[in-house]
């Protein structure tokens, strides 16, 4: 994480405005032999208590909310074709959430969250049209799944969510937070799908050095990692860059 600490001078609104832009829709994934998680092994209250002993500050409801974000961000990936693919996709998404929380905690900043781990998925701003903009677009795209009334008894699954996929997302989240699995994004703080374009005029060069646009600044890619339909980014610098003249596109 050390090489990412240079981000401390960024503005909060710019970071939130970026978000993570995934294909946030719900569909059945083409996993032919999805192995179900044993229900009686999942205990959100127990896991929350365990994680709070590892410098996290989470409740069972927080874990359920983060799991649903992972589910809607990752389950719709059309390049997923196996259980291992699904777990890797969830691992990458959970790693970004953890990396954002860790960034603020280590830097004593509030660029991504004001409320620990769950704050990463809860953080939002109101745009000029009065619409809430979240760091993860699946929340406004699936608002009914994130209403407080749908977390009664800290339920992981509600509505038409797939039980097996959701349980897989949850156990993956716990593995990421406890360090049982490696970060497949190499410390990324952002990700996108290939369909995303930020500017209607002079669009960002996603596959060159420039990664993101914040206010008057362009941000440079430190590294990028492809995981199925998502590309994950680490950021090196956000000083102003003339993106039209950057080599390597």
Image: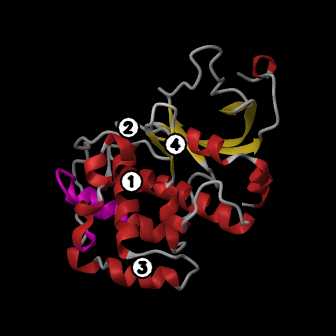
- Closer to the chain start, of discs 4 and 2, is 4
CB under 8 Å between callouts 3 and 1?
Answer: no
CB under 8 Å between callouts 3 and 2?
Answer: no
Q: Which residue is mark 2?
A: 79
Q: Nearer the viewer, residue 152 or 94?
A: 152
- From what the image shows, is residue 44 above or below residue 103? below
Q: Nearer the viewer, mark 4 or mark 2?
A: 4
Residue at x 39% of width, y 50% of height: 85
Q: Please tell me whether mark 1 sits on a helix, a strand or a loop.
A: helix
Residue 150, horizontal then vertical, whole percent: 23, 61
Q: Which residue is mark 3?
A: 48
Q: Please tell me whether mark 2 sits on a helix, a strand or a loop.
A: loop
Few, some or many C-alpha atoms within 10 Å of disc 3 (few <14, some 14-19, many ≥20)? many
How is the model colour-coded?
A: secondary structure
Q: Which residues are magenta?
A: 153-170
Few, some or many C-alpha atoms within 10 Å of disc 2 (few <14, some 14-19, many ≥20)? some
Instruction: Measure the C-alpha gap from mark 4 to mark 3.
Output: 25 Å
Q: Nearer the viewer, residue 112 or 125?
A: 125
Few, some or many C-alpha atoms within 10 Å of disc 1 (few <14, some 14-19, many ≥20)? many
Instruction: Measure the C-alpha gap from mark 4 to mark 2.
Output: 18 Å
Residue 29, horizontal then vertical, whole percent: 26, 44
> Would residue 5 be visible to someone looking at this image?
yes
Q: Nearer the viewer, mark 2 or mark 1?
A: 1
Q: Which residue is mark 1?
A: 69
Residue at x 61% of width, y 50% of height: 189
């Amino acid at each position: 994480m050390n090489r990412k600490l240079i981000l401390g001078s960024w503005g909060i609104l710019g970071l939130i405005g970026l978000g993570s832009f995934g294909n946030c829709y719900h569909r059945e994934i083409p996993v032919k032999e999805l192995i179900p998680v044993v229900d009686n092994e999942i205990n959100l209250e127990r896991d929350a208590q365990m994680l709070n002993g590892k410098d996290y500050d989470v409740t069972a409801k927080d874990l359920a909310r983060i799991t649903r974000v992972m589910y809607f961000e990752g389950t719709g990936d059309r390049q997923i074709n196996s259980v291992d693919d699904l777990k890797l996709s969830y691992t990458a998404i959970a790693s970004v959430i953890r990396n954002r929380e860790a960034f603020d905690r280590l830097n004593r900043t509030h660029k991504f969250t004001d409320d620990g781990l769950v704050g990463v998925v809860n953080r939002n701003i109101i745009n000029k049209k009065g619409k809430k903009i979240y760091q993860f677009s699946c929340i406004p795209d699936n608002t009914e799944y994130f209403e407080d009334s749908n977390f009664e008894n800290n339920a992981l699954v509600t509505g038409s969510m797939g039980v097996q996929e959701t349980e897989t997302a949850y156990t993956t989240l716990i593995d990421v937070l406890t360090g049982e699995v490696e970060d497949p994004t190499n410390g990324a703080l952002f990700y996108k799908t290939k369909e995303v374009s930020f500017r209607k005029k002079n669009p960002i060069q996603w596959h060159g050095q420039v990664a993101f646009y914040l206010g008057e600044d362009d941000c440079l890619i430190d590294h990028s990692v492809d995981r199925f339909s998502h590309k994950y980014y680490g950021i090196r610098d956000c000083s102003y860059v003339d993106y039209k003249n950057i080599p390597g596109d």
